Image: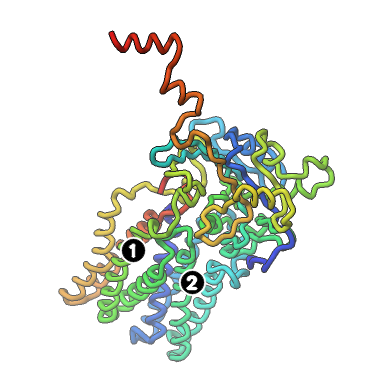
Amino acid sequence: MHPAPSVIIFSTISGLGFGLMLFMGLGLPNVQGWVAAVFATTALGLAVIGLLASTFHLGNPKNAIYAFSQWRSSWLSREGIMSVLTLGTFFIYAALWAFLDIRIPMLGYLAAGMAMITVFTTSMIYAQLKTIPRWHSATTPLLFLLYAATGGALLSGQMTAALLLLGFVTAIQALAWLQGDSALARSGSSIETATGLGDFGKVRLLEKPHSGSNYLLKEMVYVVGRKHAAKLRVIALSCVALLPAALILLTEMNHIIAAIVVLLHLVGLFAQRWLFFAEAEHVVGFYYDAR
Amino acid sequence: MTQLPASTEKKLGLVIDLDTCVGCHACVISCKEWNTGSYGAPLSDTDAYGANPVGTFLNRVHSFEAKAEGCNAQTVHFPKSCLHCEDAPCVTVCPTGASYKRSEDGIVLVNEDQCMGCGLCAWACPYGARELDAMAGVMKKCTLCVDRIYNENIPEEDRVPSCVRTCPAGARHFGDFADPESNVSKLTAARGGMDLMPELGTNPVNKYLPPRPKADVNGSQSPALAAQATEITGFLGWLDRTLEKI
């Protein structure tokens, strides 16, 4: 799948914002006044920037308003609705906390839960697709939730929680890569089932339907850069989890080191999300004898 | 509404005969010609006469080779357009309500006035039947020529999809699969019509007829040729035997 920058920025940055809402919803960090306002603005800002970025990959954004209408069947529609409801709920909770010094725990728990449901709906946009066996797995929602929570823990300075979550992220990410590498082969789809010609022997593409490229090849048969996948996985996992965990464990935590930890995590997150798209094989590739 | 209808009154679709298709691409061109000038936005091309032409098509013809161990290879030309699936995943993923399946005849369509061009329906389709138009920014797909099949302003013989009307080999057939007596139902039953990627549970309406068994696919020659190859008689036989002895 084509790793569009707008979609990578959307899913990573908005995930961090909703992750920070999770921890603020639980009353963490324990701050008041303008410090609480800065944290809340960061959470809302990240979520809003991410959601705005997602509109840049639309071919016809003037019709985006209709995306709130099909919650009965569409995960993308559910995600749009949940995002707006979560932003609203968290805004009320955070405004009361920061400006009137009234923190309503129940409202916080509600905002925290809604933030996680929003991240879950985002993950299901990808996990629901049977056409992309690598994504069609329980590890997809698990990873999105874990990455959001981990980012939230790091941003809110909850280093003990962050360490625990970094451990989970490392384990589930390794599992997702391991499972993902054989997902297409295990899916049961092949060039033989795609053409229905399996009874006639081994099938190969003799001639493409068109000499140039097309939307399908550009969008769904993206193979550029996969040759560096192994190196990128090492870079992604080191930056997103291993180095931050080492810094938390081995150094005296202060604002500068915390900033470095968050930046490392963000770089790793971009690499992870780039791989999530670039390595995903769509079954339509069988019609082009390409993965 | 992007919820699928529980059932449709008719199941209009195509039978594509892989035995008969000669791979001429006439259906590709006639589809493009009809659909660029009718339903919805035109099917745009970019750099059409340049070094890197790219364009939107609703129907494309792939060519495959199938070869079993010890057998001759066979070429199969493979036209591919929307299969108008009964459980169309492209419809349910649509966030805006632009994608829908008609309850009256089962045709899957895109309402371009509601499409925001997110492309998720194209991701959900296993068959590559949907292409986002680069100029219009909306999703394009086969309409089963909905603007021909019910069109009383054109001659009756033209009231079939453009690809069916134009196919010189008669490899494409249009009809109602809900009617067991229709031409397409009978063809499917007689020739073992099959689904593409049935493991994905899309329940395609369109069926593909597999190539008929070829006489020489197993590597054996036709009887006339085989006799000649093994046993030569007459003058040539005498010459053959004499030359062997020298």
Q: Nearer the viewer, residue B239 or B141?
A: B239
Q: Is residue A171 above or below residue A188?
A: below
Residue B54 in view here: no
Numbered circle sitting on residue A6 = none
Q: Nearer the viewer, residue A89 or A80?
A: A80
Name the spot of residue A232 as percent of width and height, x first.
Answer: 28, 56
Q: Is residue B48 above or below residue A39?
A: above
- C-alpha span from label 2 to label 1: 22 Å
Residue under the image location 62 percent in, 45 percent down: B16
The chain identifier of the residue carrying mark 1 reads A
Q: Is residue A231 above or below residue A47?
A: above
Name the spot of residue B242 as percent of width and height, x first.
Answer: 34, 9
Image quarter of residue A80:
bottom right
Residue under the image location 52 percent in, 70 percent down: A79
Q: Nearer the viewer, residue B241 or A266?
A: B241
Query: Which numbered disc, 2 or 1, marks the residue that appears first in the sequence?
Result: 2
Which residue corresponds to mark 2?
A121
Name the residue type under label 2.
Thr
| Mark 2: few/some/many CA within 10 Å (<14, 14-19, 20+) | many
The chain identifier of the residue carrying mark 2 reads A
Numbered circle sitting on residue A179 = 1
User: Of all residues shown, which one is farthest toward the left?
Assistant: A250
Residue B116 in view here: yes
Name the residue type under label 1.
Gln
Residue under the image location 44 percent in, 15 percent down: B233
Q: Which quadrant, please, contains the C terminus of chain B? A: top left
Residue A243 appears left or right of A287 = left
| Mark 1: few/some/many CA within 10 Å (<14, 14-19, 20+) | some
Image quarter of residue A127:
bottom left
